[in-house]
Image: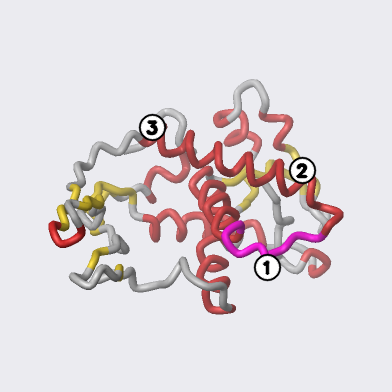
Amino acid sequence: MLSTLDITPAAHAIQVEQIQFKGSPAWLRNGSAWVPDPGPIDYVGHPTPELDEAWEKLLRDRYFMITEEEARAAFPTEWKEAYAKMPGGEEGYLVGLDMFHTLHCVNQIRQMLWPEYYEPPPATANFEVLHKGHCIDQIRQYIMCSGDLTPIPTKFYDFLGGFRYVDSNYPHTCRNFGKIREWVDERVKQNAKGRGEKSGGKLPEIVF
């Protein structure tokens, strides 16, 4: 279902489905924790090139150009601020979808857990504090906005003295991520047509 604030041309890419969440930990009788049902792709854990590649595949080409008509519809009073000139000479309105922005923020928080691996250059330390704070609040607002009412149980572990832990490995009603990813990829592909070699067919990366 398309909301009045969704980008209208993506309407056909919205497909609602039920997705089984995965990744909740459980406990063995010896007290050790494990993940009995991990997802098919690792997005967490000790940093590795493979882990970074998995996140890169989620976040690739987050931004694309839209027409003036689309910009006016999306940002009635601020559409001119989205105007951009690309390295190859292309001009238009550069936008991204907030889902990918929030995923970027989750990835930033993930990297915060491993500062020895993802340590920012000293010159950007101040900016990184601001960036990480922005990301935490973006995730908070995004979660509160979605208002997911899926009930999840707490599991009782009598052998751990009555310890309880939530189990979120239950179906949730979701928009099909793959369909939206395909729609953005198609827009990026359309943007790249006719773009000069100077830009390499790529739009600039945005940090926030």
Question: Magenta segment, principal secondary structure?
Answer: loop
Picture disc at residue 3: 3
Q: Is residue 118 magenta?
A: yes
Regarding residue 189, the answer to whether it shows in the image is no
The amino acid pointed to by label 2 is Ala
Secondary structure type for disc 3: loop
Give the percent coordinates (x, y) of residue 150: 22, 42
Residue 180, how many percent across, how many down? 43, 54
Q: Is residue 75 left or right of residue 160?
A: right
Q: How far apart are marks 2 and 3 (CA)?
A: 27 Å
Q: Which residue is drawn at 34% across and 54% down?
A: 176
The amino acid beneath tag 3 is Ser
Checking the image for residue 126, the label placed there is none
| Residue closer to the observer: 98 or 135 | 135
Mark 1 is on which residue type? Glu
Residue under pointer 2: 84
| Mark in front: 1 vs 2 | 1
Question: Which range is magenta?
Answer: 112-121
Give the image location of residue 28, x and y in percent. 21, 70
Residue count near mark 1 (Cα–Cα under 10 Å), binned few <14, some 14–19, many ≥20: few
* Quarter of the image that includes the N terminus: top left
Q: Which residue is drawn at 63% across and 41% down?
A: 133
Query: Which residue is denoted by mark 1 in the rendering?
Result: 116
Q: Nearer the viewer, residue 19 or 192?
A: 19
